[in-house]
Image: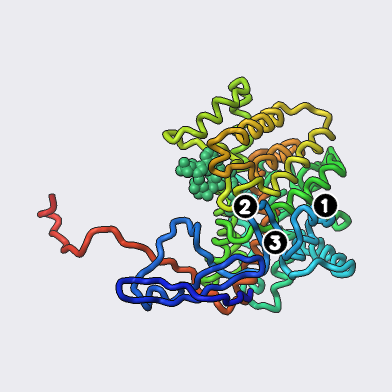
């Protein structure tokens, strides 16, 4: 997390000049350090959504939004998706290096060892209404893990490995159990002989009357889908995980908060919204032009879901991988999916439209992932859960980095107050 000082910037306020250090990261990102601004000048910055504000220095993930580059610990996401399994990338994000054969074998064995959840916790599912959104269950169960493993709920660094491994393995089990609950099927327990992704697909799709209804294409697709979701620097949910952790809350509570942030339709919930948008277009006779015009209409709150990004003003590199995966999974099912045709037409027309070109609006990670999950038999309301399972190692890595960062302080932004000036309480009988 070391930044190099490359010079100074001056801020002139009235007759005062504040000299602020300017730092540069290893990929050329430069930042002005304004930590003395309020104390020296009385001014604060105003930056809704923190579009221009760096919250930390981080070694984990690098994004170049203009060039469409995404790297985890220096490795390009496409290189990792092509050459690694998801648990190798989880290990990389959390430990800083890819595992050796022996380290991967131990990690895989630990993930299997801790894949079950406490039977009392499994009982929780009985009392959720059938139509509970699985993200609500996932968040509640994540924080409840600190009740079942209180010794792990504390921030003892020596336990981090166990705490982290437990979380990565059990959240996947909880996700599959919440799906089975939603369809009224009995839970299918994890099996030690299966690798991470196959274990998940088995828990999701096997049943007492149907063993292993998944294939190698689905296992490969799930590994790659989880890899492209694994981290994305200081996105909304990662910032929430860091923020909750900065108050000293334990890892499980911080992750639970991150799951809730990801649920938002503008963030991780977009993959579910994309499918609902494509299904609505299909029902409406496939009129893509009408939807594009609606997305451009400033009087309408409608946005083209799966398009646009705070950082990428070019094609999201993850969307390229997801699009290829989507086409491969659909081809393997030998089915024709009208929604894929609609998505491809929507993409082509939007990318040729000046409104989208001028604003740097391209498909993001959510545009094709929902279609792929749908082809794998994963229901729409589980799409954001899949995003959470993929993003979990990234959240954990961000949380752990914040714990070790000497610059880290409790997250507490300031504000510009625009409310009433001081006034006295009027007795209620005299109020108008
Ligand atoms: C994720 O941060 C991350 O890294 C997130 C994520 C991750 O891995 O963690 O990448 C995951 O959240 C991906 C994004 C998923 N969300 C969606 O697909 C929802 C649809 N997209 C938009 O809501 C929007 O693009 C955001 C929320 C993603 C980004 O919003 P910004 O950065 O605040 O952009 P903006 O609102 O400032 O938009 C700039 C302009 C505006 O028009 P003008 O006011 O300049 O005329 O672009 C327009 C916006 O109206 N615009 C869109 C649009 N997205 C932006 N217009 C139509 N459709 C869209 N999708």
- Give the numbered dot on residue 42: none
Going from N to C along the chain, the mark reached first, 3 or 1, is 1
Q: Which residue is mark 1?
A: 82
Observer able to see residue 177: no
State the colouring used for the structure image: rainbow
Badge 1, how many Cα within 10 Å: few under 14, some, many 20+? few
The reply to whether dot 1 and dot 2 touch (C-beta < 8 Å) is no
Q: Is residue 103 left or right of residue 14?
A: right
The reply to whether dot 3 and dot 1 touch (C-beta < 8 Å) is no
Regarding mark 2 in the picture, which secondary structure is present there? loop
Residue shown at the point (50%, 34%) measured from the top left = 296
Q: Is residue 210 above or below residue 312?
A: above
Give me the C-alpha separation between circle 3 and circle 1.
19 Å
Q: Is mark 2 within 8 Å of ligand 1?
A: no
Q: Which residue is mark 3?
A: 393
| Residue 398 locus on image (x, y percent) | 63, 66
Q: Which residue is mark 2?
A: 66
| Residue 215 locus on image (x, y percent) | 86, 42
Residue shown at the point (73%, 52%) measured from the top left = 226
Mark 3 or mark 1, whichever is nearer to me: 1
Going from N to C along the chain, the mark reached first, 3 or 2, is 2
Regarding mark 1 in the picture, which secondary structure is present there? helix
Seen from the viewer's position, the closer of residues 317 and 102 is 317
Give me the C-alpha separation between circle 1 and circle 2.
23 Å
Q: Is residue 147 left or right of residue 78?
A: left
Going from N to C along the chain, the mark reached first, 1 or 2, is 2
Mark 1 or mark 2, whichever is nearer to me: 2
Seen from the viewer's position, the closer of residues 224 and 137 is 224
Q: Is mark 1 within 8 Å of ligand 1?
A: no
Residue 412 falls in image quadrant:
bottom left
């Amino acid at each position: 997390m070391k930044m190099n000082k490359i010079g100074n910037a001056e801020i002139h306020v009235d007759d005062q000049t504040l000299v602020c250090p300017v730092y540069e990261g290893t990929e050329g990102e430069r930042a002005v350090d304004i930590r003395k601004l309020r104390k020296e000048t009385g001014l604060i910055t105003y930056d809704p959504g923190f579009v221009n504000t760096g919250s930390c220095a981080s070694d984990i993930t690098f994004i170049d939004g203009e060039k469409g580059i995404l790297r985890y610990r220096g490795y390009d996401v496409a290189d990792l998706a092509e050459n690694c399994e998801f648990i190798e990338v989880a290990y990389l994000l959390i430990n800083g290096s890819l595992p050796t054969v022996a380290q991967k074998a131990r990690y895989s064995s630990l993930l299997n060892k801790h894949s079950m959840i406490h039977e009392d916790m499994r009982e929780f599912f009985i009392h959720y209404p059938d139509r509970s959104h699985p993200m609500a269950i996932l968040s509640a169960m994540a924080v409840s893990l600190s009740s079942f493993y209180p010794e792990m709920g504390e921030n003892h660094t020596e336990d981090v490995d166990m705490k982290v491994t437990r979380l990565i393995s059990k959240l996947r089990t909880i996700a599959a159990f919440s799906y089975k609950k939603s369809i009224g099927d009995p839970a299918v327990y994890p099996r030690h002989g299966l690798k991470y992704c196959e274990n998940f697909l088995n828990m999701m799709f096997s049943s007492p009357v149907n063993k292993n209804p998944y294939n190698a294409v689905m296992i490969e697709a799930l590994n790659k889908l989880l890899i492209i979701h694994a981290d994305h620097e200081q996105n909304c949910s990662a910032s929430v995980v860091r923020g909750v952790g900065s108050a000293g809350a334990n890892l499980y509570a911080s992750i639970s908060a991150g799951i809730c942030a990801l649920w938002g339709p503008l963030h991780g919930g977009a993959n579910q919204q994309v499918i609902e948008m494509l299904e609505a277009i299909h029902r409406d006779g496939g009129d893509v032009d009408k939807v594009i015009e609606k997305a451009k209409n400033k009087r309408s709150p409608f946005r083209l879901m799966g398009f646009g990004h705070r950082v990428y003003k070019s094609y999201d590199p993850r969307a390229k991988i997801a699009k290829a995966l989507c086409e491969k999974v659909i081809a393997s099912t030998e089915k024709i999916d009208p929604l894929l045709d609609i998505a491809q037409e929507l993409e082509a027309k939007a990318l040729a439209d000046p409104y989208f070109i001028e604003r740097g609006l391209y498909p993001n990670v959510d545009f094709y992932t929902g279609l792929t999950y749908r082809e794998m038999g994963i229901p729409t309301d589980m799409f954001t859960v899949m995003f959470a399972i993929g993003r979990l190692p990234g959240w954990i890595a961000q949380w752990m980095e914040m714990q070790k960062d000497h610059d880290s302080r409790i997250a507490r932004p300031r504000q510009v107050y625009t409310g009433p000036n001081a006034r006295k309480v009027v007795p209620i009988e005299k109020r108008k």
